[in-house]
Image: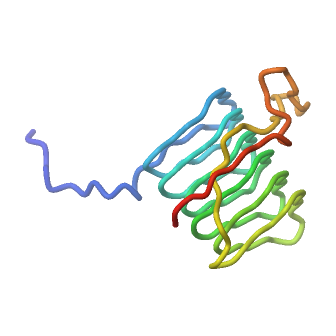
């Protein structure tokens, strides 16, 4: 059967997904949406939306257009658009966003900078992560989170 070359290639319909039970060590960068329901130790960078599901646990920074968090994040969050934080979310780190929505019950620890005139920055190092047992991973190859360095991002 001939292939239809008229099919839409709109990147917003594409999704990089890590399902519950997945464990990834390393940074992930994608031009499309990213959804995580597993464990990631490393940064997630997307030109589109990042979704951290109820079972998602991130030990690293999130950088994306729009970001939705319903799980656990230990790292900085940089949302160039809207940041949505669900009622059961736990976020430990600096938050930079143009707009933010936070449901009652969410746990936030760190600094929050929100607004159209907020200077967004680029994180360069990973934060501590929890391992699959829920314990903090403070192995020597991990940064303490206190030594994160930043550079300005045009935007």
Above-or-below relation of 59 to 78: above
Residue at far bottom of view = 116
Q: In the picture, residue 135 is in which quadrant?
A: top right
Residue 146, image x and y in percent?
Answer: 86, 42
Residue 18, image x and y in percent?
Answer: 59, 37
Q: Is residue 35 toward the left or the right of residue 15 in the image?
A: right
Q: In the picture, residue 3 is in which quadrant?
A: top left
Residue at far top of view = 140
Q: Is residue 108 toward the left or the right of residue 77 in the image?
A: right
Question: Count the marks: how many?
Answer: 0
Q: Nearer the viewer, residue 92 or 115?
A: 115
Q: Nearer the viewer, residue 138 or 90?
A: 138
Q: Is residue 109 toward the left or the right of residue 127 in the image?
A: right
Q: Nearer the viewer, residue 5 or 131?
A: 131
Residue 16, image x and y in percent?
Answer: 49, 43
At a point 21% along the width and 55% down the height, the residue shown is 7
Residue 147, image x and y in percent?
Answer: 81, 40
Q: Nearer the viewer, residue 1 or 96?
A: 96
At a point 81% along the width and 56% down the height, the residue shown is 89
| Colour scheme shown | rainbow
At a point 52% along the width and 67% down the height, the residue shown is 155
What is the quadrant of the N terminus in the image? top left
At a point 88% along the width and 27% down the height, the residue shown is 138
Residue at far left of view = 2
């Amino acid at each position: 059967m001939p292939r239809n070359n008229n099919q839409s290639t709109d990147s917003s319909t594409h999704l990089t997904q890590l399902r519950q039970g997945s464990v990834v060590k390393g940074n992930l960068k994608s031009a499309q949406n990213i959804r995580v329901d597993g464990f990631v130790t490393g940064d997630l960078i997307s030109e589109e939306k990042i979704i951290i599901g109820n079972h998602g646990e991130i030990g690293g920074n999130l950088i994306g257009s729009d970001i939705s968090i319903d799980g656990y994040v230990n790292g900085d969050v940089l949302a160039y658009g809207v940041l949505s934080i669900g009622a059961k979310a736990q976020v430990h780190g600096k938050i930079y966003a143009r707009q933010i929505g936070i449901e009652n019950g969410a746990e936030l620890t760190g600094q929050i900078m929100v607004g159209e005139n907020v200077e967004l920055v680029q994180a360069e190092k990973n934060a501590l992560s929890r391992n699959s047992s829920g314990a903090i991973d403070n192995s020597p190859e991990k940064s303490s989170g206190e030594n994160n360095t930043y550079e300005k991002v045009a935007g």
